[in-house]
Image (tube, helix red, strand yellow):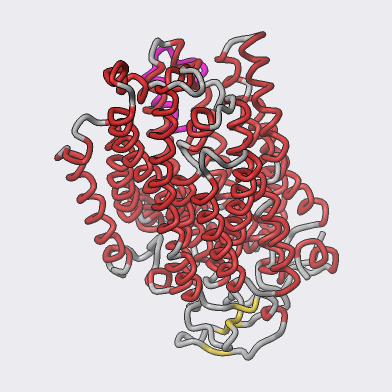
Amino acid sequence: MAEPAESTPQQHYGAMSDDGNDEEQSLLSSNEIQQGVESIEAISQSWSRRSLIVAYLGILLLAFATSLEVQTTSNLTVYATSAFAAHSLVSTVLVVQSIVNAVVKAPMAKFANVFGRLEAFTLSIGLYVLGYAQMAASSNVQTFASAQIFYSAGSQGLQILQQIFIADTSCLLNRALLSGLPDQPFLITVWVGPVIADTVLDKLTWRWGYAVWLIVLPIAFSPLAFSLLWNMKKANNVQLLPRGIRRQRSVLDFVRKLWLDLDVVGLVLLSASVSLILLPLTIAAKTTAKWHNASIITMLIAGVIGLLVFPLWETSAKLAPSPFLSLRLLTNRTVLAGCAIGFFYFSVFYTSVQPYFSSYLQVVHSQSVTAAGHVVNIFNFSSTITNVLIALVIKYTGHYKYFVTVGGCIYLLGVSLVKLYRSEESSIGMIIATQIAMGVGVSIVHVPTQLGIQASVAHADVAAATAIFLTSVEIGGAVGSAISGALWSSNVLSKLELYLPSRTKADAPTIFANLTIAKSYPKGSLEKLAIERSYQETMDVILAVAACLAAPIIPLSFVLKSYRLDGARKKDNVADDDNGMRDERTEHSGLLGRVKGKWIRQLLGN
């Protein structure tokens, strides 16, 4: 058992900036740090070699299980909705998922700060399992669609909690490498998942494809849960754990403290605002009146107003004594610029890659569904592999900001090359090359941006900063999807009506609505040429917009503060803040810097 390290009243979590100043990293008094944060700080002092290795193997096992689940069940959704004679409602299921995906990260991060990491992981697994149980047992499409709320809450909760746990237990230099750990199983599961789905549909029923995860996910979670629980017990034995939130004088005191600690009003305001923005963006292209629909405009305006009110609520000490987003976060230039970068790079992905690239490949380049899927996945493959490479470069250079700028340039170059070479005359090899360039660029942007945001804040703010960054990414994806959907809907149909020969002009709406029919015309026929031209010209417009969305990433990267990630290894001057609290930087940034034992420093430190 590792001997507990001597704790200090205040542990700074970030890194030193290049100019030696750290004004953006506000010091926190002990009463500002919530119970869940104090708990993981206490637990970190009791890690043994075995428990820490088990914890990270648990993260990898859980990531593999969830990645395999996604790659398997994504092939079953159409069969589930078809079983209820409601295949057209697949889009409704995806709408529910996209909204929950965006709004759940902030509440889950706050829950982890208040109650603890183990409790938050357990809640996410419970929601995950509940969602799949409801899907497997659903008797109608309404029940199946509503199950997406629990499923998406659980899956996105696990996503944010994995990143928070890695941030809790790693130094800044190695965090970029470890934060990519949950993404690596994709390199395997993308091939295995569809095979499992085919086997389930052939040998069993689609219901078993969902029900099996009721068993698999809790088992996959058990190593991580055991490691956290065991070390929590050890920390409790030496009285390191904070006093429980439930120790209040009365039930009313408990409810009041819990209400304030969770910042219920702030989280509801944020979640409702994001939902009111995402819902019209997602469904506008599917309605008859589109953006002329008064309800859609009203929801969008209400959502924007809610987002403007949210920071006013969070910065009021009287209304929100334990805010999810404190003033120090809302005025942190690295956090704000990083969130904007996340918004733009994911909006580019949802214009240039998803959701119409596969359809374009099948119609214009006559690719099969499988071949088109492989070409689309080249983006994910190249970005996943680059994650590891850029993380190693960050580790051995100790810098992050410059790579965001370089990544932004590569990303913009990649999008520009896509605009130039995604044409009827280009070979599939050239199209793949442009996908690789984009994948490399986005990875070099994403990894250091998330790391820079975490480096710029104190440990108590890491969960909130990570959550708001990933939420910004989701919102960017929704905006990009709405833009591409609107451009696709308004351009393809009008161009079909313009280019189709007179004998088939009346079929334009049918060709537009059905990909199978669009692919059915013989190569070289007048109809096929008209369809290909319509798709190509529309894709050109969408890619031009994508290039415009990629451009702001470069100037935003200049706004990021340049932190020396390896500077935290040196003992800097010890300064007293206004409250007399001492900011003592130890040998490592991150909680493991206070854990004794050379082997831990070699494993996750420096």
Image quadrant holding the N terminus, namely bottom right
Q: Give me the residue at 49% from left, 75% from top.
A: 558
Of all residues, the one furthest to the left in this rendering is 294
Q: Is residue 137 left or right of residue 502?
A: right
Relative to 215, is 545 on the left or the right?
A: left
Residue sitting at 54 percent across and 20 percent down?
76
Q: Is residue 140 above or below residue 331?
A: above
- Asked if residue 194 shows in the view, the reply is yes
Q: Position of residue 492 (x, y in %)?
A: 34, 34
Q: Which residues are magenta?
A: 134-151
Q: Above or below — where is 503 with respect to 537?
A: above
Dividing the picture into quarters, in which one does residue 215 lie? top right
Residue 138 falls inside the magenta stretch: yes
Determine whether, in the image, residue 421 is placed left or right of residue 45: left
Could you tell whether 511 is left or right of 355 in the image? Answer: left
Residue depicted at x 45% and y 87%? 578
Q: Is residue 29 visible?
A: no
In the rendered view, would you say 227 is above or below 198? below
Give the quadrant of the C terminus: bottom right
How far across and down, in percent of the image, does residue 59 sit? 69, 46
Frontmost residue, 550 versus 540: 540
Q: Nearer the viewer, residue 513 or 262?
A: 513
Q: Main secondary structure of the magenta part?
A: helix
- Nearer to me, 129 or 519: 519
